[in-house]
Image: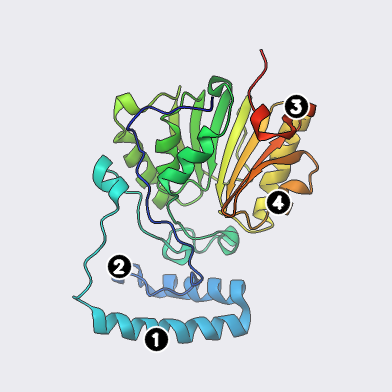
Amino acid sequence: MGLEASPGCFALSSISTAAIIEALEIPDRKRRSPARRFAQLRYAWDRHGLIGFVWLVAYNIAHHIRSLKQRGQVTRQVDPFDQKYGTETGGYRDIRSLDVITLPAARYAGRYEPSSAELVRSELEKLQIDPERFTFIDFGSGKGRVLLIAAGFPFKEVVGVEFSRELHEIAKQNIAQIPPECCRAGALRSIHGDATAFELPKSDLVCYFYNPFDPPVITAVADHLAAHHQDFGYRIIIIYVDPRHREAFERTQKFVALDETPATLILTTVQGPADQTIGSLEESG
């Protein structure tokens, strides 16, 4: 038997498609200050180089023209997850539209895109563990959707780490909306901070990543997790969605793959021979 969540809590799936254009979307009017525009352009130049920058500018000019033609004709789609639970976790936010655009680490961060609730629950239910021994951490937790879903499982604690204060504040508001009957975790919180400097809890960990970082940030986080296992012996399970940088974990030689689909990868630190298969995730004792 795998993990079981509170029935009926945060179970709806949401649309979650990857986008190839993320650097120069036309911003909202309220974010169009000269300083913000300059920071956005600098971010795009640093991340994509001359050729990519020119292509993105041309793309977004065309996009803006199309948007002007379609203005007033498009009805904003209501996210079914948010509609059901009264939260605000839907939508997409490019890094350049957030308060972190001027930070050096911004060039290595992916845009905010909510995870599919159905996918998160499916991956968690594969883990045949005693969740009360594990702390769940979402690295790059954004508006907190994954935290709300994970709170439906009896983890020791559910923690989100987000370096955008803007998204962190939204996550705190969403956490306040969670129905008491849907929270089985010992504690639930969002932390505003740097994932590479986050002090890991002294417990076994289930860590969730929805392709939040590029190297060198993802590499630093993977090294930190590997050291946590090496130094303290804690078991660490990684749920990696859209695993573009799996080598960051594999290079540490502390993780082995337990389960893999086209969209997800589950890794674990090796405690013994029995940990080599997904079916042996159940804790002994």
User: Closer to the N terminus: mark 1 or mark 2?
Assistant: 2
Name the disc covering residue 26, or none: none
Q: Can residue 110 be seen in this snapshot? A: yes
Q: Can residue 191 be seen in this snapshot? A: no
Q: Which marked residue is nearer to the observer: mark 3 or mark 1?
A: 3
Q: Residue at x 72, y 51 (%)?
A: 248
**Disc 1 marks which residue?**
62
**Disc 4 marks which residue?**
219
Name the disc covering residue 30, or none: 2
Q: CA distance from mark 4 to mark 2?
A: 35 Å
Residue type, mark 4 in image: Thr
Q: CA distance from mark 4 to mark 1?
A: 36 Å
Q: CA distance from mark 1 to mark 2?
A: 22 Å
Around disc 1, counting alpha carbons within 10 Å, would you say few (fewer than 14), some (14 to 19), or many (20 or more)? few
Asked if the residue under mark 1 is in contact with the one under mark 3, i.e. CB atoms within 8 Å, the reply is no
81, above or below 7, in the image: below
